[in-house]
Each structure stands twice: as C-alpha cells, then as structure tokens.
C-alpha cells in the first residue's frame, strides 16, 4: 500500500466525519469567521461570533458598523483592532462589487481585505465544493511529520506537495482530517502517538 493510501485509510478510521468547526449559517458568516480565526482558535472565534452575527448578519449591515462596536465584540480573540478593520472593509467591498455575496472565484476572494490564499481555499472548499487544500499550522506540522513535505517548506510549497501527493477528489475531506489529526492527536507539544496508524512513516515517532 502506498503511503498516501495508508494516510487516507488511517484518517478515515480516526476522523471519518471531520468538518469545519467554525460555527456559521451562511457563506458570509464562514468568511468572516475564517478571517477572525487567524492566529487564534476556532473555539475562541465561536465565542464571539454569535453576538457579532446577531448584530451584523450580512455584508450590508457590517459594512455600516462602527469600528468601536466591532472591536468591543471581537476583543477576546486578539488582534481585534486589525481584524475589525478588515472585516468592515471586506464587507464594504462585498457590497460595492459583489452585491453583498461571497464571490466564487479565487482571484475575487483574494482581493478582499484580510483574505489570503489559505482563507480563500477554506471558502472555496466549504462553500463551493472546489477541491482545495488549505495549509494552516496543523496541516503544515502533520505534512512534515509524515514526510510529505520538508522541514523548511513554506505553506505554498506544502500545498503544492499535498495536491501532488493525494488525489484531487480527496483534498477537501483530507484538509479537515489533517486539521483534526493535528489538533487532537498529532499535537505540536506532546503528541499522542499511542495507536497512531502512521508510526511507520512518521519522522517524529521514529
């Protein structure tokens, strides 16, 4: 069995139902939540978004928001000042150029304030079923430990190697499974190697 097949099989056994853990009810809410999730946890974001989305449920309302009010709501997640500026600006761009809707094209997504390739990949994958492999800290760490990428690879190189390593129709599910694996088992500190199906190919375990 190829290592890629071993990883797919192992992750299907460990996390068969892995999915995005950011709470959202619309494409707009997911986009805002992903932008807010930079350098913090999904759990923290999920604590502030209920009030945020109750006050500002769409791009039209958030575009008109007072910066101080948005800062007050999202203050617990850290970097709240820049994030508040970005999500208000982002909403204004959505209203002005996209009728308040989240665009489906990568170049349009990446033109939005606060949205880079990783965020665009998450939106393309979760909202529009476009195969994509978003590389966050968990995906990066797991890729390196499982010898898919090298220690000094940056996120763009890791993404390219992951897409070459796995079949395209698996990218979307594997993205979530890599995050779950890195978040709950293959942690940065004190990973739980007990019963890990990848001991034979893992450079950390070895």
Image (cartoon, rainbow, N blue to C red):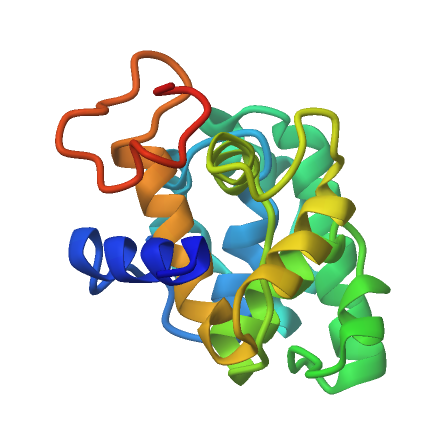
Residue at horizontal 46 percent and vertical 24 percent from the top: 203
Tell me which corner region of the image, top left, top right, bottom left or bottom right, holds residue 80.
top right
Q: Position of residue 133 (x, y in %)?
A: 58, 61
Q: Indicate left or right for 80 with 172 as reference.
A: right
Q: Is residue 87 above or below residue 28?
A: above
Residue that sits furthest to the front in the current view: 1
Q: Is residue 171 above or below residue 67?
A: below
Quadrant of image for the C terminus: top left
Residue at horizontal 76 percent and vertical 81 percent from the top: 105
Q: Indicate left or right for 131 with 7 as reference.
A: right
Q: How many marks?
A: 0
Q: Position of residue 2 (x, y in %)?
A: 42, 59
In this view of the protein, can residue 62 be seen by the observer? Answer: no
Residue at horizontal 56 percent and vertical 76 percent from the top: 168
In this view of the protein, can residue 184 be seen by the observer? Answer: yes
Quadrant of image for the N terminus: bottom left
Front one among 115 and 82: 115
Front one among 78 and 50: 78
Q: Indicate left or right for 164 with 32 as reference.
A: right
Residue that sits furthest to the left in the current view: 195
Q: Indicate left or right for 115 with 128 as reference.
A: right
Q: Position of residue 150 (x, y in %)?
A: 67, 32
Q: Position of residue 99 (x, y in %)?
A: 73, 87
Residue at horizontal 76 percent and vertical 69 percent from the top: 109
């Amino acid at each position: 069995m190829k290592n890629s097949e071993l990883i797919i099989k192992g992750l299907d056994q460990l996390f068969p139902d892995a999915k995005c853990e950011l709470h959202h009810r619309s494409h707009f809410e997911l986009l805002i939540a992903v932008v807010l999730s930079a350098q913090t946890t999904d759990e923290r974001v999920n604590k502030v978004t209920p009030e945020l989305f109750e006050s500002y449920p769409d791009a039209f309302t958030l575009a008109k928001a007072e910066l101080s009010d948005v800062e007050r709501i999202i203050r617990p997640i850290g970097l709240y000042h820049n994030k508040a500026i970005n999500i208000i600006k982002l909403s204004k761009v959505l209203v002005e150029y996209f009728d308040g809707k989240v665009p489906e094209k990568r170049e349009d997504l990446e033109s939005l304030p606060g949205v880079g390739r990783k965020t665009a990949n998450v939106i393309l994958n979760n909202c529009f079923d476009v195969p994509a492999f978003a590389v966050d800290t968990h995906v990066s760490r797991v890729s390196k430990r499982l010898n898919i990428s090298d220690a000094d690879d940056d996120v763009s190189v890791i993404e390219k190697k992951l897409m070459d390593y796995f079949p395209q129709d698996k990218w979307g599910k594997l993205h979530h499974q890599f995050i779950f694996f890195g978040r709950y088992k293959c942690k940065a500190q004190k990973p739980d190697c007990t019963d890990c199906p990848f001991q034979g190919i893992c450079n950390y375990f070895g």
